Image (spheres, rainbow, N blue to C red):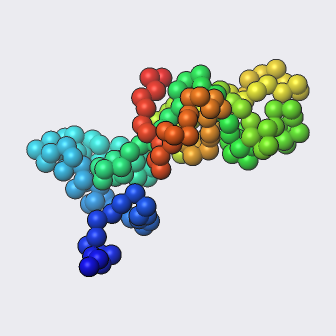
Amino acid sequence: MEKDAKTRPMNADDKVVCTVSITNEILRNTLGRVLGWERENLIALFHGLLAESHIGSEMFMKVAMGGELPYVPTKGSEVYVPINKLGWNVDEKPYQASSHNENGFIKCTVMSFRGYHQYTPLAVQLPTLEISNDPIIAWISLDDWEHADSDFYEESKVESTRPYVTTGF
């Protein structure tokens, strides 16, 4: 006899999708459980820091509930970025018409990572166009890139979430 959906164990094929509103009370209670209630000064400090960034709060809650942080490519690695995701400070039209356009993607070099609490934490350097010799830096989301080096990012290692890697920069 099969167990009903409420009691059966989850397996890799099960998907849980929901929206959770993170209130100050939920954030404070989770910090208390993670840090220990006797560390009131740390709870107050981290609550203030996390409350300033909903992305930081979301990442903290995800990790506190057993999830993993998104993978961050290392400095100097090459990544493909969709032309329409190059960032607010980049004019897309010259790149669409350039020889650097590879089926709607531009190969970029990772320059830095600002932290998981930012909307666009990853700085990438775009290839130089003929009209300008100045390097252009674009700020992109952690969801807006793919590895350019297929040896580095083998399909067999791809999971539903990207593993966390300390970048050191």
**Which residue is more in the foreground, 16 or 167?**
16
Image quadrant occupied by the N terminus? bottom left
Residue ranking furthest to the front? 1
Q: Residue at x 74, y 36 (%)?
A: 106
Q: Residue at x 38, y 45 (%)?
A: 68
Where on the picture, by quarter, is residue 129? top right
In the displayed structure image, the side of residue 146 where residue 28 appears, left or right: left
Residue 98 location in percent, x, y?
Answer: 87, 34
Q: Splitting the image into 4 quarters, where does residue 90 fall? A: top right
From the viewer's perspective, tell me whether residue 30 is left or right of residue 75: left
Q: Give residue 29's position: percent from left, percent from top.
A: 22, 56
The percent coordinates of residue 74 (x first, y second) are: 52, 26
Q: In this view of the protein, can residue 120 be seen by the observer?
A: no
When asked about the image quadrant of residue 7, the answer is: bottom left
For image coordinates 22% across by 40% down, the residue present is 42
Q: Nearer the viewer, residue 4 or 92?
A: 4
Give percent across and percent down for residue 138.
Answer: 67, 35
Q: Is residue 152 left or right of residue 125?
A: left
Looking at the rendered structure, the number of numbered marks drawn on it comes to 0
Residue at figure coordinates x 18%, y 50% from the top left: 33
Does any portion of residue 164 appear in the rendered image?
A: yes
